[in-house]
Amino acid sequence: MQIDQLKPIIEAALLASTQPMTVHQLGDLFNEDEEVGPQQIAQALESLGGDCEGRGIELKEVASGFRYQVRQDVHPWISRMWTERPSRYSRALLETLALIAYRQPITRPEIEQIRGVVVSSNIIKTMEEREWIRVVGHRDVPGRPALFGTTRAFLDYFNLKSLDQLPPLSEIRDMEDPQMRFEPEPLPVRIARDLPIDPDEEMAAEADDGETEIAHHASADAADADDNTAGADAPAVSSEVDAPGSDTSPAIDHPIATADEAANPAADVEADDASQDTEEYRA
């Protein structure tokens, strides 16, 4: 059968199928008498892919086979045909799925060790229900944890033919989305002032300046205090000097001779009375 005859058949089969079809599955459409081999089918598929240039659809080879799909360029308009919003997956689910894809086979404890948090059972259940991951074995350690790996449905969903088409980790680190970066951006450098060559010397100089300023203020305060004290405590200076013989000195009728007489004035009175009695007796 000629290639021109094979192309419409293969194209119709791919459009009618709900799943991608492999070359072997497409070969089952023909009888042995028609003598259609894998090489002829591959040539027809290549020609069909070239016919899609400039159109809104493309012939894509994924892990499960070949399929027609909408081009990414026109997808924003085609998505308006469905009222349901596309599914949005949490960051935890995508991180877990990425670890399984890049490190498979991998156990759940190993994922938790890398991420630093416990993996929710709902995340594992969701990926298993979507047939993105499956249990491929058990690790030979105590507890025999399950080993997880990706499936063909995972590759089909993400438009991949094999795991080799996964983007390398270097490209993931350079993604523009700041939430997906592995290394945080360095903060901008802000210089407040010029730093000294020897910080200890500057600290000592600042301490000396502070002590000098404090001492200056203390001496100024002490001088003001001395001036105020001198003005308040200084006695009034008289133009005339009091002298014992001057007219201005007060008259002293009974000067105190000694400290004993000042301390015992009653003793002097008794002595005078005693001398008076003696004189009367003699008389």
Image (cartoon, rainbow, N blue to C red):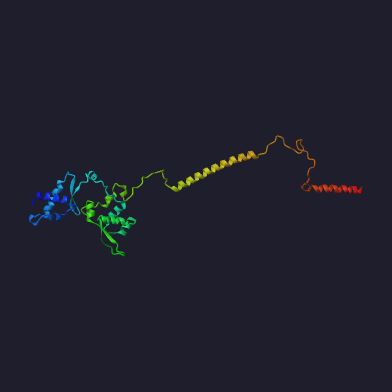
**Image position of 93 with respect to 257: above or below:** below
Q: Please state the horizontal and vertical placement of residue 242, each as a whole percent of the image.
A: 73, 37
Q: Is residue 5 visible?
A: yes
Q: Is residue 100 above or below residue 212?
A: below
Relative to 99, does residue 57 appear above or below in the rendering? above
| View extreme (right): residue | 283
Along the viewing direction, whichever of 69 and 95 lies nearer the viewer: 69
Outermost residue toward the left in this view: 33
Q: How many marks?
A: 0
Judged left or right of residue 91, residue 30 is left
User: What residue lies at 88% left-to-right and 48% top-to-bottom?
Assistant: 277
Residue at 53% over, 43% down? 214
Q: In this image, 283 relative to 217: left or right?
A: right
Image side of residue 207 versus residue 39, left or right:
right
Say which quarter of the image contains residue 129. bottom left
Q: Nearer the viewer, residue 219 or 46?
A: 46
- Which of the pair 73/193 is nearer the observer? 73
Residue depicted at 31% across the width and 56% down the height: 122
- Residue 18 point in image, percent of width and height: 19, 52
Residue 25, position in %: x, y?
A: 15, 55
Work out which residue is located at the far front of the displayed protein and give it: 83
Q: x, y (%) of residue 261?
A: 79, 47
Q: Residue at x 60, y 41 (%)?
A: 225
Residue 163 seen:
no
